[in-house]
Amino acid sequence: MFQHGLLGRVRQFTQALVVSSLLAAGLAQAQSGPVKLMVGFPPGGGTDAIARILADKLKDQLGVSVVVDNKAGAGGQIAAQALKAAAPDGNTLFLSHDHTISILPLVVKNPGFEPHKDFVAVAGFATFVNALAVSGGTPAKSMAEYVSFVQKQGAGLGTVGVPAPASVPEFLVKVIGQKYQLDLQAAPYRGSAPMMADMLGNQINAGVGSVPDFIESQKAGKIRVVAVLGGVRQAALPEVPTFAELGLAGFEDVPYYGIFAPKGTSPAVIEKLSGAVAKVVAMPDVRERLTTMGLTVGYMTSAQLASRELAYATTWARIIKDSGFKAQ
């Protein structure tokens, strides 16, 4: 009996050593760097700025360099495809908001990736809201004045920029037009940076995008945000009413920001990376910078981000279906 018990304990000890070695190897994978943090949009936009804030702090937590890699195009589709093709070693990650992960698979027939099959959630770190902003050359200073401006000025002035085709902002343009009986036409761009350039140059009169895209130009008085989505006013824009306040309800489920890894990345690596994100977003200076940009900062575990993404995709699948849009 004694010998049998001793052998059992030896086997348990040996198994524990093997597990510990595997975990150590997995953690080492995440730190064999450098880590590439991909962004699906060009430099200069809100998502790019957010990625650079996090990358600067993550390098200290992971002990390796973290480099932002802008793989712009097709609303993040190129970056998502690159993530799918990457080795699941923790050295290639994708920082994305809702559009690429939740919306693209609903509006593109063959996006080249399936989020739940090809990716694993690492961590979420913030939510945000979309907003309608008017350019500096537009006299409107409120939603009511913008509606009046479009109604009075006639055709051609109802063009509204959006950061990507078949995106939540594009669907919002359609909903806003229906609500206020305006002939609004969405003008899709390849990211928020070129859209903002045309807004600042008064090439278009308005744009729908995320608050982080608009916040700096709003503060500088170069554009005017006239309404935001979500259930409450934003801390960064307390004077701007929500669409719900203006009578356009049903868009209280706000988008998210998260980091994703290729499917097959080990749980140990995911835990290590997620823990590093948690420490970074808990830093007062990071929280302040992200909040100032118009984000609501809040850490989400891998499981919480996966659940959040699924709920958001379910909500928008219904909205997109009701709009009559057909996947292209």
Image: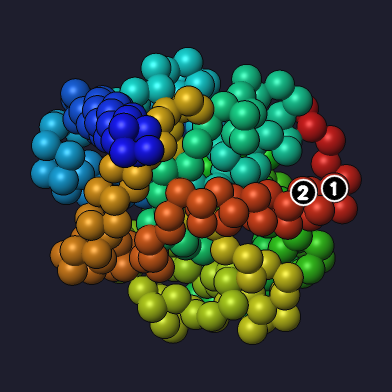
Task: Say whether marks 2 and 1 touch (CB < 8 Å).
Answer: yes
In this rendering, is residue 220 above or below 97? Answer: below
273 or 312, nearer to the observer: 273
Quarter of the figure with the C terminus: top right
Does 212 sit left or right of 131 as displayed?
left
Q: Residues within 10 Å of mark 1 (few under 14, many from 20)?
A: few
Q: Tell me where residue 42 appears, x and y as whole percent.
A: 37, 33
Q: Which residue is mark 2?
A: 317
| Residue drawn at (49%, 80%) of the image | 233
- Is the residue 196 above or below the residue 141 in the image? above
Question: Where on the picture, by quarter, is residue 104?
Answer: top right
SS label for mark 2: helix
Q: Amino acid at mark 2?
A: Ala
The residue where tag 1 is placed is: 321
Tell me, yes or no, if residue 193 can be seen here.
no
Quadrant of the rendering where the N terminus is positioned = top left
